[in-house]
Image (spheres, rainbow, N blue to C red):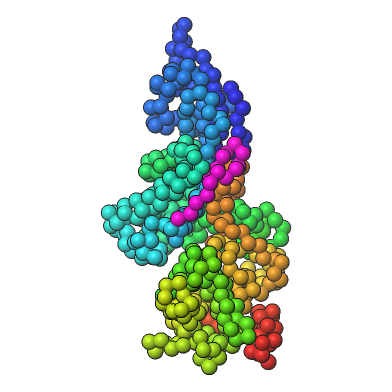
Amino acid sequence: MGERNEKSLTRKMFLRISPPGNGDIIGDKERIQKALSDEFGEVRFSHRMLNKIYPLCRDANWEISLTLIQNGKYWEIVELEAGDMRHQHLGIAVDLGSTSVAMKIVDLNTGIVLGEESLLNHQIQYGDDILTRIFYAKNKPDHLQEIQAATVATFNELLDRLGKKARINPRESSIMVVSGNTTMIHFLLGIDPWPVFEYPFAPVFNHTGYLDAQDLGLATGGYLYCMPSVANYLGGDTVSGLLVAGLHEKDELGLFIDIGTNGEMVLGNKDFLFAGAGAAGPALEGGISKNGMKATSGAVDSVVIEDNTLRLTTIGESRPLGICGSGIVDLIAQMLLSGWIDFSGRFNQEKSERIVKRDGEYGILYASREESGSGEELLFTQTDMSQFIDTKAAASTMVAYLLERLGVEPMDIDRLYVSGAFGTYINLESAITIGLYPDLPRERYVSLGNSSLNGAYALLTNEQKMAEVAMLQKRIEYLEFGAATDFISRMYASRFLPHTDFDLYPTVKAALKKQGRLR
């Protein structure tokens, strides 16, 4: 028996087994089980693996490689191969987002990432937002099948790209770990997610266990494991994020925030974990404005207003084609500090020639026809502003409500972990200026990047994290924001920039005084 990798989620080993003969006529399956029993106890075979034993083992002269995974009390055979294939031990980590899907292929012997790709989720053709997709699939099995097929097609396109990029065959992977919100995992498995949004908001499942990836039509081998969810709005992507943030391991009080289409947050430390989640809206991903766009080439990603002059940058340094979430946050913060908008977000048209009226509505012309890459005017309108402020108000109110329920003041937070693509690229000062994040000392903020993908990778490369996943799912206490009777009135107070109570944002208050906006 050869050495095996002790750390990754799957174990790969090489066996030389005595062949049958001379009165030794036990079955091939039992022969393999006997060779493994001292280390692994009872080992189980799926029907697919049972079918693979013959003639593989005999053709290989009983020199075979096995890949195993621990499934509860038992170990299961994930793959059988002829010869010594320990050098080839692959796994795949996936962040299944409603907007985009990101994937890594990993050498599980070393933990080295062999390739990483991302792609817009093909589900988008059935609705830009999750709720539209849910209504499309509700009680319509053929529609649900279409959404599942689109999800699988996204995965398979990424697998194909990664295979070509890394010059490997993704079908040789032994395990795929997928991290996503509750609804996305339902769609991946072809299960109607309507119960997620219907009272009493209990999903069809929280935990899938291990599944055969090929049963779902995925162009990869081995098993699929989906990070478990805690509740309808608190999915496996948040569990992944907590694996990365490590709140549950620390004495200090931490707050984990992932704000996108949904807002998810967890407050706690090694003694307790208290979570809340709810719909935030598409604004923070650039999904509100006619000229809003994802963070791709040509998107305005930063804005500065100096001496009453607007300057911007774009991704790829090309002419602007639209504006993404980080650009919107910068634009609003800079306009607030410069007096181009008031504290309710209304435009002060006399402050700049860039504040124009089109179709009876004011807006900021951040790129004229001559300046834009499309030859069209790029505007952020009063309607866009109102929708963004609604989203910002929902997100900041969720944070405030969670803190208040636990009797915690913002300054009690020792570390604030910001997750997601939006949290990675946003200008922190701008986010605090408009009241999206609490006004804490900046050194307390930690950017986690794509913690959903990184958490999937962490589990993939360290099977000991499985115990943490199970513990997190059980320990997190969930707060349903929709049950708060005063949530709407609280949101109204948060519709001002940064807030109706300026004392909650002392550094913003000081900056506004410096600009002459406050006395």
Residue 409 quadrant? bottom right
Residue 355 position in % (x across, y down): 50, 87
Position of residue 309 in the picture relative to residue 200 (left or right): right
Residue 69 position in % (x across, y down): 52, 35
At 46% from the left edge and 19% from the top edge, which residue is drawn?
A: 60
Residue 35 or residue 110, whichever sits in front:
110
Residue 340 position in % (x across, y down): 56, 87
Give the main secondary structure, helix, strand or loop, of the magenta stretch. Answer: strand
Quarter that holds the C terminus? bottom right
Quarter that holds the N terminus? top right
Position of residue 331 in the picture relative to residue 48 (left or right): right
Q: Residue furthest front?
A: 370
Query: Number of numbered discs present?
Result: 0
When the figure is inspected, residue 114 is found, relative to residue 339, above or below; the finding is: above
Residue 374 or residue 208, whichever sits in front:
374
Q: Is residue 204 magenta?
A: no
At 41% from the left edge and 42% from the top edge, which residue is drawn?
A: 219
When the figure is inspected, residue 381 is found, relative to residue 519, above or below; the finding is: above
At 45% from the left edge and 55% from the top edge, which residue is drawn?
A: 119
- Can residue 265 be seen at all in this image of the molecule? no
- Can residue 22 be seen at all in this image of the molecule? yes
At 59% from the left edge and 26% from the top edge, which residue is drawn?
A: 39
Range of magenta residues? 105-119
Residue 99 quadrant? bottom left
